[in-house]
Amino acid sequence: MSNPVKIDFVSDVACPWCAIGLASLERAIAAVGDGLQIEVRFQPFELNPDMGPAGESIADHLGHKYGLSPEQLAQNGEALRRRGEALGFYFDLQKRDRIYNTFDAHRLLHWAGGIGAEPQRALKHALLRAYHGEGRNVSDRDTLVAIAGDAGLDADEARRILDTGRFAAEVRERERFYQQHGIQAVPSVIFNERHLVQGGQPPETFEQALRQLSGITA
């Protein structure tokens, strides 16, 4: 019998390296195999909590924030696209041209997590595909309702949540918790509430951690 492994995947929908990290983690989980007892929960982090409802051009935003030139942005985007493609995640860098506020998306993820790990995972994947692969506005409530429905969740309930303040306090509490524990960048992948792996690491890094913690050898 293997040791159970709990994973808190702290991330933001608007973070491209979070999509890379999740794809790598899931490839590692598959590599370890069926004997792995694992629970993955998605925890909220906002890269741009003060972003307005209209969002901002990614080129302008990253240029101001990191001082990157258009040429550097293009090079970084191509490297990101290739990393994603190797893991089976597809970025459409032409469509994904704006960055948006993601707080409402995190509210829906919290709701989905209360239903179960698999509904939350399905919604997380749907949100990442919608934003990074299709360039959809993940701050728009009609769009979020449609994404929730596509993920197999109750679209009417999703709209009721978005039209109220439900789960806002819970998301804020989770965000504060991780910030107070030193999480300042994502993805931050926390194993058994003790062991931290950060960034869009390759699958081998996650596989090594999973094998060490679970006791499953290659």
Image: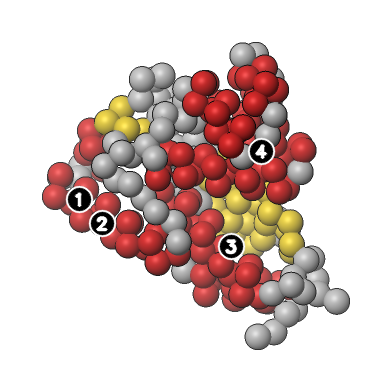
| Residue indicated by mark 4 | 152
Question: Where in the figure is residue 170, as x and y percent of width and height?
Answer: 69, 28
| Residue indicated by mark 2 | 78
Amino acid at pointer 4 = Gly
Residue 9 appears anywhere in the view: yes
Question: Where in the figure is residue 194, as x and y percent of width and height?
Answer: 68, 59
Q: Check if mark 1's residue and mark 2's residue have beta carbons within 8 Å.
A: yes
Residue shown at the point (66%, 75%) measured from the top left: 32
4 vs 3, front mark = 4
Q: For residue 94, which quarter of the picture? A: top left
Q: Which quarter of the figure is the N terminus placed in? A: bottom right
Q: CA distance from mark 2 to mark 4?
A: 32 Å
Amino acid at pointer 1 = Ala
Q: CA distance from mark 1 to mark 2?
A: 6 Å
> In the image, which disc is placed on residue 26?
3
Lower position in the chain sequence, tag 3 or tag 2: 3
Q: CA distance from mark 3 to mark 2?
A: 23 Å
Question: Where in the figure is residue 216, as x and y percent of width and height?
Answer: 73, 80
> In the image, which disc is placed on residue 74?
1
Lower position in the chain sequence, tag 1 or tag 3: 3
Q: CA distance from mark 4 to mark 1?
A: 35 Å
Q: Is residue 21 left or right of residue 136?
A: right
Q: Tell me the SS state at disc 3.
A: helix
Q: Residues within 10 Å of mark 4 (few under 14, many from 20)?
A: few
